[in-house]
Image: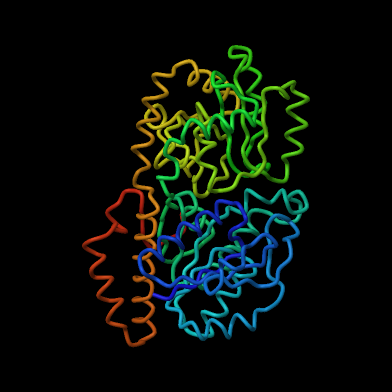
Amino acid sequence: MNIGIFTDTYSPQISGVATSIATLEEELRRRGHNVYIFTTTDPNADRASEEGRVFRLPSIPFVFFPERRIAIAGMSKFIRLVGELNLDIIHTHTEFSLGLLGKKIAKKYSIPIIHTYHTMYVDYLHYIAKGKILKPNMVKRMTRSFCESYQALIAPTQKVRHHLEDCGLNKLIYTIPTGTDLHSFERADDETLDAIRSELGISKEDPVILSLGRVAYEKNIDAILEAFPKVLQEIPNAKLVIVGDGPIKAELEEKSVELGLADSVIFTGAVEWTKVGNYYQLGHLFVSASTSETQGLTYIEAMASGLPVVAKRDESIEDFLIDEKTGFLFDSDEELAPRLLFVLKNPGRAKQIAQNGRSEVLCYSAENFGKTVEAAYMEVIATYQSTERKPIDLKPTLLRSKMASQVFSLTSNPHIRKGRSSRRD
């Protein structure tokens, strides 16, 4: 297949969306497909390595999320280019500039189109006039308006699927969790880990609590900082390592000083994707107090790394994080400190839960992710061709038939759900 992926967020930007797209792109190419990325310009992009596969539109930072970008020109050129590439399907990953362009191109050239809904915007309203302009119901109407013209949607979790249903969307929705390269999170060599510890000022004997991801309000990192003094009362040499960057990093650094945690809390800033696996290996446990996740990638990565996970209970993680079986859950922020202390003080129990967790996430491999999205593409193409009464290419039909019996099934795997949604009361 010739596949066009349209996204405002792409490498070298660091985000869950960028990681998801990079994983999907690599797997689809490995499976023999031609994948073309249509995205925004980035001053740090390596254009030489992207030639022929990545096409960038002139862009500027997005006003509400300055670390993200939106296209401002060059759309006519892209429209002509796509006409020459003979795309079989378009897959959009944004509701903004490149998403709108992808929809326009799909309509112009009669190309089937599918969309992955990555972001629960109701959790981000505080970035826009502190939530005083846009309200949740307005966002739901905007989501429905944007998504209703697609042949199908992909939701990374059941939580996102239910949100789309609540928005009033009644169409085919595939629930396909983002996969990850599990091999990237195997044990790093001691020399590499010792070098990172030395750089961060951590000794091998210090218990390390790891937080990794975008440093933003919706991640509720405040709750972790506020719980940490209680941990230090009983384990004085514990360290909290916060890996990542974001709009409130400076604010949280200041708060850690105010709480008297400056010697025990370490902010690393952004870390290159290729090195992230090493930072997981520093931890004795991984913690998240967020309830705004749509993919749960960091949880899966931590579990693949063999870390026990302490997480706030949320629908986005309920398929793979089960309390006292594959992880440790808490409901209120007040429960966080006791949970952290329990894990650190019971290493045998923590190790068993971590082993269970690693086994649980083996099905979230990049390979399975690629297979499942490929199968969704083929189904959408076949349905579109049938509906539009277009001649069906024999090769994709045979491939689709072969996949039905040989690859990761869309319906039999408990983590992959498919179906036409109807609004829930």
Quadrant for residue 376, please give it.
Answer: bottom left
Figure disc tally: 0
Residue that appears at 67% across and 23% down: 264
Outermost top residue: 234
Tell me if residue 6 comes above or below residue 296 in the rendering.
below
Quadrant for residue 134, please give it.
Answer: bottom right
272 or 121, which is in the foreground?
Answer: 272
Tell me where residue 28 appears, x and y as whole percent: 40, 64
- Quadrant where the N terminus lies? bottom left
Residue that appears at 46% across and 56% down: 23
Outermost front residue: 191
Tell me where residue 138 appears, x and y as whole percent: 65, 59
Residue that appears at 54% across and 56% down: 118
Tell me if residue 423 comes above or below residue 297 in the rendering.
below
270 or 79, which is in the foreground?
Answer: 270
Q: How is the image coloured?
A: rainbow
Is residue 337 left or right of 306 when viewed as pictured?
right
Residue that appears at 44% across and 41% down: 185
113 or 201, which is in the foreground?
Answer: 201
153 or 378, which is in the foreground?
Answer: 378
Tell me where residue 93 appears, x and y as whole percent: 54, 63
Is residue 423 left or right of 412 when viewed as pictured?
right
Tell me where residue 162 appears, x and y as whole percent: 47, 53
Is residue 301 left or right of 224 when viewed as pictured?
left
